[in-house]
Amino acid sequence: MAVQHPAASSEWIKRCCGALLFGSGIAALVYQVLWIKQLSIVVGAEVYAISIAISGFFGGLALGGWLFGRLAGRNIRYLRLYALIEVAVAIASIATTWMLAHAAPWFVGLHATSNVLAWSVVFLLVGLPALAMGGTLPILVHAAVKNQVEVGRAGGGLYAANTAGAIVGALLPAFVLIPAFGVKGTSLVAATINIAAAAAAMALDRFTSFSTDVLRAAPTAPRNKHAQWAIVLYGAAGSVALGYEVVWSQAIIQFMSTRSFALSVVLATYLAGIAIGAAMFARWGDRFKNPGLVFGFLIAAAGWVSLIEIAVLGHWLVIVQTLSETGVYSLTASNLAGMSARFASAAICIVFVPTLLLGAAFPAVLKLAVGETRVGRDVGMVVAVNTLGGIVGTLVTGFVLVPRLGLVRTLGVLAITAALIGIVAVMRFAGSKSRRWPIFAIAAASTIIAIATPVDQLARLLPAAQTGRLAFYEESAGGTVAVVETSHADHHFHRLYIQGVSNSGDAVPSLRYMRLQALLPLIIHNGDPTSALVIGYGTGITAGALSQFPTLQQRVVSELLPAVIRAAPNFEGTFDAASDPGLEKRVRDGRQEFQLSKERYDLITLEPPPPSAAGVVNLYSSDFYRLAASQLNEKGIVAQWLPLPTQNEEDTQALVRSFVDIFPYASLWSTELHETMLVGSFQPIELDIPRITARFERPQTRAALSAVGVNSPAALLATWITDRNGLERFAGNVTAVTDDWPAIEYATWVRSGEFARTFTHLKQFRSDPQLRNSDLAFTSDVSAQREELDAFYQLGLSVYSGDRARYARDVSRVMEAAKGNTYYRWFISPKQ
């Protein structure tokens, strides 16, 4: 028998249930964002590991939907059950967040003993809270729905409310919570939302006549074939939908940024389409007499639109983004708001319409699959099967289709699959054959577009590819890697692009700072260094430069993306690092390199992507430096690349603080106008001039450095900026970057002119290097080299500020120095 509710309060009850699910959605997405971040530290940032780990989360959601759905219809009070679920979610989620914060060491230990046991523990940690989360929707849908007639409207409305909460949950961590409260503090905020929802549900249970009704089970009949087909097809649609998300996340990135803000906006847009689509069908879906026919068209049309949007992508999107950014900035005077508008416009153009159609499919399926006497049970089954389909779709798309077919062809396969799902649905549910022809037209159109769209459509859209030659391009689950050959004035060089964002290249300025990143710490080393590890292969210049220090016996480099290593032969100035048998290349992320290996090194040089990029902050935290320090030999050195233009000054201060908090002896060196290097150790580093000179004068070492404008030991030491005392004063009382407080990943947009301000401020803490066994002539030479370098840097700052008078005054001296300095000559021709 159907559950009966007082008619007068039924709409109000639905709205209350919607509000509860809105809160549940916020908390669930906050936890998901937190745990993905934490899992990258525990299991590694490598995409396969993260995908497997997060599958435990979605698997828990699916199991929870199925288990709690089976409780529906029994002699229970649903609002009280919902309240208990929310309390359980809060407790389990806080426990999971805190345990994941300390899980990396024991995961490595368990992994060494039993791979299955280690992953089982991870699955339990993220799966148990998710199991409880998965029960909230089917329980409240059963509580709010009076009969099968309104299941599409009410179920779709509640699903939309839950997804709307997820939109807020996707945005809050990046824009508000993590910067303000850190990772653990954010989990407490999410748990507070769970507890508030539980309290509201208990109040609703106590004070409404609805909630005091005892809902009794009714005899249940087996699902009819229509319902079974609907559930199976919706599971297949879930695979396709999550496959789209994998493709979109890489296709859109070149129009976006690798900042967490951008990724949050894309996720929020994806969820917004789902929520609005579900809400629209919930409101107007009863006008359609055949929900099966509508479902088929929605799934097929979503694939067709996805293909169209990628096929027509072009410079017009950049224009739309620019107009959006300009308009929002003019209203808000906020760079962050303007850039967020830029991101949102790209997401809307690529993601929004297909997700709108996919969202509308959920209430359509509910009308097909949910029986009169088993509302909660059937809703739970629909959600569970769709979620399991999503897991399969994510793994197959990311690890099979994209690596083998590329993004464009993968999207074509997904769209054609969606069309086939639509055809089966229409054939199964449409009574009249005359209604079937449109679905075949969509399928034919999808096939034609999938074949006609160039496989390199996305590669052509790389901004640098418009004016340069694409030398290398590879799409994979871990990201898109490209190498573009380009030119500037009389110079020809290559740039490395990861996810559409320029990382580095082989122009002389890049060669300079990367060779110094490898060789300077080895030259000033107080011991006799024989082993070195580089974190981050990139162009291969830093790792290759190690070969020019002849006493090194062990050279190791760790890189996350295999495609980056495959792209390496395209870069010059690497000393053939790509084919060097003496350079051991390990494909793993930096954290895993330290957690899995017990080797110790005389030098560890860290050159990850810029610290503001999403997911990279874990390689700049004091926790990471503590790991690196544990791998050092007695007189070992850690050298950290520290770019200045990629973050605001307060964030640079935080990065310095995280470094000096770990290493009692620290110094800062200028490796290029825009780049610096932190050098840290546990023993004092004495700048012994005879030893430094002897190492520098080795033919290979001298040649490698002279080629980038470091022509003498004095020129090398002229790059010194300050010691620990100066770094302490510069960092001040700024909070260090830690795994729990990764604020720089969520920092505000870089302010205009910030690089020049940071550079000028750093110069105020400049000191003279303490030279040992130096004579007056050498000390004077160092001073002269510093003055020459200062003049060049000041020339660069004059260009930034537009100070033509200062530029005209300084350029003649730099032009004279450029005659014997390759680095200066790259910018300024002595013939000018």
Image: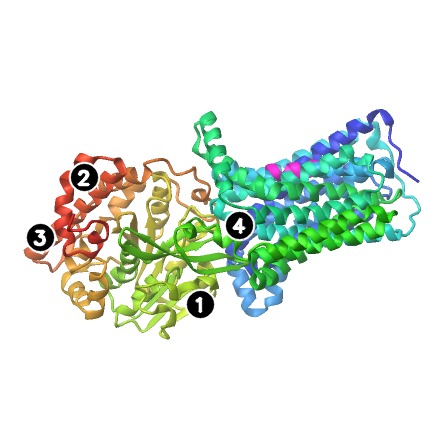
What secondary structure predominates along the stretch shown in magenta? helix
Q: Earlier in the sequence, mark 4 or mark 2?
A: 4
Number of the front mark, 4 or 2: 2
In the drawing, what numbered circle is on residue 586?
Answer: 1
Q: Nearer the viewer, residue 353 or 34?
A: 353
List the residue tagged with mark 3. 780
Q: Residue at x 44, y 66 (%)?
A: 566
Instruction: Farthest residue to the left: give it.
Output: 776
Q: Earlier in the sequence, mark 4 or mark 3?
A: 4
Q: Is residue 628 visible?
A: yes
Tell me which corner region of the image, top left, top right, bottom left or bottom right, holds residue 606: bottom left
List the residue tagged with mark 4. 37
Q: Residue at x 90, y 52 (%)?
A: 222
Q: Is residue 124 visible?
A: no
Calculate the distance from the C-alpha at mark 1 to the C-alpha at mark 4: 23 Å
x then y, percent, for residue 542: 33, 62
How many residues crowd mark 4 within 10 Å: few (<14), some (14–19), many (20+)?
Answer: some
Tell me which corner region of the image, top left, top right, bottom left or bottom right, holds residue 283: top right
